[in-house]
Image (cartoon, rainbow, N blue to C red):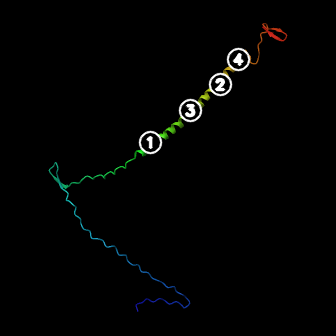
Amino acid sequence: MNEPTVPRRPPGHHQAAVTVHHPTPITPAPTAPLVPVQPDSVPAVASVVLPDGRVVTGYAIEAAKPEPVAAKPAVSRAAVNIALGGIGFGAVCGGLFLLTTFIAALAALIHQLIVLAAVIFGGWIAVQVFSATGHRAGTTTVNIRKAVIKRNHFHH
């Protein structure tokens, strides 16, 4: 009579079946017992005498050895030549681009200098023409005493 009793429900109520799951404990993996391992060889014990007479004894420690460097793979001559040729081709293309840019800039500079010279020279000519007629602009001076009028023609 140790079984638990579940209270009864009235007849019209349906009760779903309840399943109880009990966790199963996980057993740890068996571990191997720790066994002390002796080194292959016993290191040499070194003793050092300090200046005050004390003796210090201990094991000598070896310096850490660097890992051996892996050998570099051999580079083929053809790969080196192709790489150098590509670098040279790029340099030549860049140089030609800079050269054409320089030539275009130089041509534009020469064009501007020619236009500037034409403007200055044209201005100088205009000043000479307009200032040669006298002090008053827009007037024409005619020396009538030297000119002889004969049938609507001027003769000197």
Give the percent coordinates (x, y) of residue 43.
20, 57
Q: Which mark is residue 118?
A: 2
Q: Which mark is residue 84?
A: 1
Which callout, 2 or 1, points at the residue further toward the start of the chain? 1
User: For the residues carrying marks 2 and 1, which lies nearer the camera in this image?
Assistant: 1
Per the image, label 3 sits on a secondary structure element best described as: helix
Which callout, 2 or 4, points at the residue further toward the start of the chain? 2
User: For the residues carrying marks 4 and 3, which lies nearer the camera in this image?
Assistant: 3
Which callout, 3 or 1, points at the residue further toward the start of the chain? 1
Give residue 14's quadrant in the image: bottom right
Check if mark 4's residue and mark 3's residue have beta carbons within 8 Å: no
Q: Residue at x 65, y 24 (%)?
A: 118
Q: Marks 2 and 4, Cα distance to the nearest angstrom?
A: 20 Å
Q: Marks 2 and 3, Cα distance to the nearest angstrom?
A: 22 Å
* Left or right position of 55 against 81: left
Q: Nearer the viewer, residue 105 or 60?
A: 105
Location of mark 3 (residue): 103
Location of mark 4 (residue): 131
Per the image, label 2 sits on a secondary structure element best described as: helix
User: For the residues carrying marks 1 and 4, which lies nearer the camera in this image?
Assistant: 1
**Three-letter code, disc 3:** Ile
Q: Of all residues shown, which one is farthest toward the front?
A: 78
Give the percent coordinates (x, y) of residue 92.
50, 38
Q: Residue at x 51, y 36 (%)?
A: 95
Q: Which mark is residue 50?
A: none
**Three-letter code, disc 4:** Ser
Per the image, label 1 sits on a secondary structure element best described as: helix
Check if mark 2's residue and mark 4's residue have beta carbons within 8 Å: no
* Left or right position of 23 against 64: right
Q: Nearer the viewer, residue 94 or 121?
A: 94
**Three-letter code, disc 1:** Leu
Q: Marks 4 and 3, Cα distance to the nearest angstrom?
A: 42 Å
